[in-house]
Amino acid sequence: MPSLAHDEPTIRQILQRAEDLYEQFGTPLVGAPHRRAWAFARAFGATRLAREFGVARATVVTARRLAFARWHYWMTRYEEPVWQQLADVAGDHHRWEACVVRYRSVRATLRQEHFPRESSDLQSDALVACAVRSLASVPWRNYDTVCWQSVWRLLARRSVRQARQLADQLGWSAVQWRRARGAVPRLGALIWLPVSQRQLLALRAWPAAHLAALQQTGQALFPTRSIRLLELVRLAPISIAHVARTHDHVPVARESHAPHSAQPTCGPTVRSTGATNRLPADGGRR
């Protein structure tokens, strides 16, 4: 519809503002069932936004109504299930509110393409996993910036033609394009992690069960060590790929090539040091 296409930029601007408010104040902007759109309309005054966006007030009124429909669907379909998992992460119901506050902070940090500060408690990795899945579920962002992240995320949205156009602008080879197309479906929400393209390409070699665990709990367990989401940014691509391979031991010398690859002091990471830490009798095969 022409009118919808005309309103689309304003709709997306309003939805991005809604995300900002949600992360800052925690309000879902949904409201009670009998007046659901009231909180949304109150947060985004038509006159103020019309002046700020440089559009007609009637355009803002229409766009706000359509934006609320998308926001309400996303909040109930995708974000509320995340709240249920946050209750499990918090454990005690008295700590749920504090857990949600931390989650919103982590989500805002990741949305700005930054990694949150690493923490020693495993709850941090679970919150990162929740935030990554939440970001991956948002349908209204524009990925028109010419960068590799836009290509990957457009592929995740199944916008193959637009992704190909950006890849051509970046001068990608056929091999680069094929690798990205193969990695995106396998990695799922993990492509929203602010790590390098080479790290993600190395991560795609992990078994599917370990990738799923990384997305759900923020931690993947291997026979010789555990890998946390907040640890990934510290590992070089060769180290990430090496973790998933079946060997008698994991050479520490390989880790020395990665920047900041010293043994982390946080998390239950265990690294093999030789023959004393042999794999199980089945060779560690899953």
Image (tube, rainbow, N blue to C red):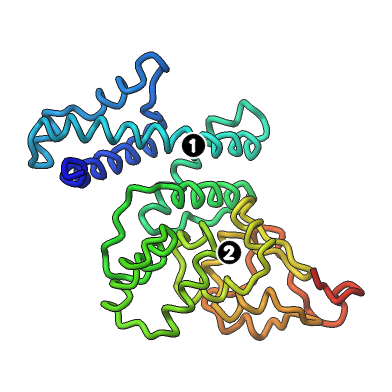
Residue 72 percent coordinates (x, y): 39, 31
Q: Check disc 2 and report the residue beneath it.
A: 231
Query: Tag 1: residue type?
Result: Arg
Q: Residue at x 42, y 78 (%)?
A: 177
Left or right side of 202 for 109: left
Count of marks, rendered view: 2
Residue 280 percent coordinates (x, y): 88, 72
Quarter of the image with the N terminus in it: top left
Residue 164 percent coordinates (x, y): 33, 72
Which residue is farthest top?
A: 34
- Separation of residues labelled 1 and 2 (CA atoms): 30 Å
Secondary structure, mark 1, is helix
Checking the image for residue 164, the label placed there is: none
Q: Residue at x 38, y 35 (%)?
A: 22
Q: Check disc 1 and report the residue beneath it.
A: 77
Q: Nearer the viewer, residue 8 or 130?
A: 8
Secondary structure, mark 2, is helix
Residue 96 percent coordinates (x, y): 58, 31
Which residue is farthest right?
A: 281
Q: Residue at x 32, y 51 (%)?
A: 141
Quarter of the image with the C terminus in it: bottom right
Q: Is residue 56 above or below residue 131?
A: above
